[in-house]
Image: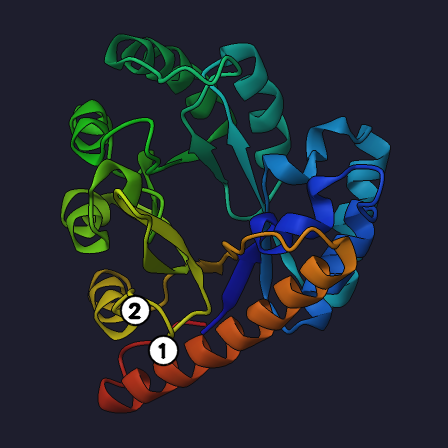
Amino acid sequence: MKIGMTTFGFRHLVLDRSLSPSLDQIVRRARALGFDSLQVCENARPMELSERDWEAVLQSADEVGLEIQLGCKTVDLDILRLWAERASCLPSRMLRLVLEQDSRLPVSRTEVDRFLAGAMPVLEAKQLRLAIENHYDVASRVLADVVASYPKDQVGFCVDTANSLRNFESTEMVLDLLGDRAFCYHVKDYSVEDGGLGFRVAGAPLGEGKLDLDLVLERILNCDPAPPIFVENWRTATGDWETDVHQDDSWLRHSLDILRARLSTMERVSPAWGSSD
């Protein structure tokens, strides 16, 4: 089964544009770590590239055998159109979307409804699927209700295993609400720490935190025997760029090894899982 990562796996590598390598180098780095696909998200700033430079990135990905997908964050239709144009040229025919505006204020239900109504003609014209990622700004129950009237093969979800914890929505709850429309998955683990007057949620190496990885993978595989799974990191910065970049790489390798081992075990139990590669 193919396993990918998103550019949030390289969270600290790309955070500072003055230190970040080129997207071409990031593509080769992802492949060198052993991943089969890379979802290039807004943190890697792909839309800042000229068409020529973007084509060069795609050529590099093709040379090393890495599938490219795109992910953006917006509720601005003009911005969506720019991302959709590039996503429409990729084999996946999918664009991952986080519903968040530049003001950082939470997006209202009215704004989401208006945005999706305007987005549909864009998606149809480009023959794209929209994978809306669950995020703490919009409750998963609202997301499920918002997309209910749209075709399942056109508007669905990117289910993230940790993004909704701030909304007090467990991974199982998110899968219950959004799993039947999932186009892809972001997998990252987490820990829950004592925060004095409350608690603090932080990242953890995959398989070592509170995420019930076996249960999550079983539920994912029951919906799709060969699902698009993308690994992400959620590490707290140390303050030293080189250390943070090295530790991100270490967590990515660990996550890939853990996922491959768990999926291999599950495939032996149920050979139908993973049969489509």
The answer to which quarter of the image holds residue 40 is: top right
Q: Is residue 54 left or right of residue 7?
A: right
User: Closer to the camera, 3 or 14?
Assistant: 14
**Residue in the image at 80% along x and 30% along y:** 51
Looking at the image, the residue that sits furthest to the bottom is: 268
Upstream in sequence: badge 1 or badge 2: 2
Decide: few, some or many residues near mark 2? Use Cα within 10 Å; few <14, some 14-19, many ≥20. some
Placement of the N terminus among the 4 image quadrants: bottom left
Q: Position of residue 45 (x, y in %)?
A: 70, 34
**Residue in the image at 36% along x and 67% along y:** 226
Q: Position of residue 185 (x, y in %)?
A: 38, 54
Height in image: 9 above or below 127? below
Q: How many marks?
A: 2
User: Closer to the camera, 236 or 150?
Assistant: 236
Whether residues under marks 1 and 2 lie with C-beta atoms below 8 angstroms apart, the answer is yes
**Residue in the image at 17% along x and 55% along y:** 172
Q: Is residue 232 left or right of residue 143?
A: right
Decide: few, some or many residues near mark 1? Use Cα within 10 Å; few <14, some 14-19, many ≥20. few
Q: Position of residue 64 (x, y in %)?
A: 75, 66
Height in image: 74 above or below 160? above
Q: Which residue is mark 2?
A: 225
The answer to which quarter of the image holds residue 224 is: bottom left
Height in image: 189 above or below 112? below
Q: Amino acid under label 1?
A: Ser
Name the secondary structure under disc 2: loop
User: Closer to the camera, 196 or 33?
Assistant: 196
Q: Position of residue 49 (x, y in %)?
A: 79, 31
Task: Give the CA separation, mark 1 to mark 2.
Answer: 7 Å
Q: Which residue is mark 1?
A: 275
Q: Amino acid under label 2?
A: Pro
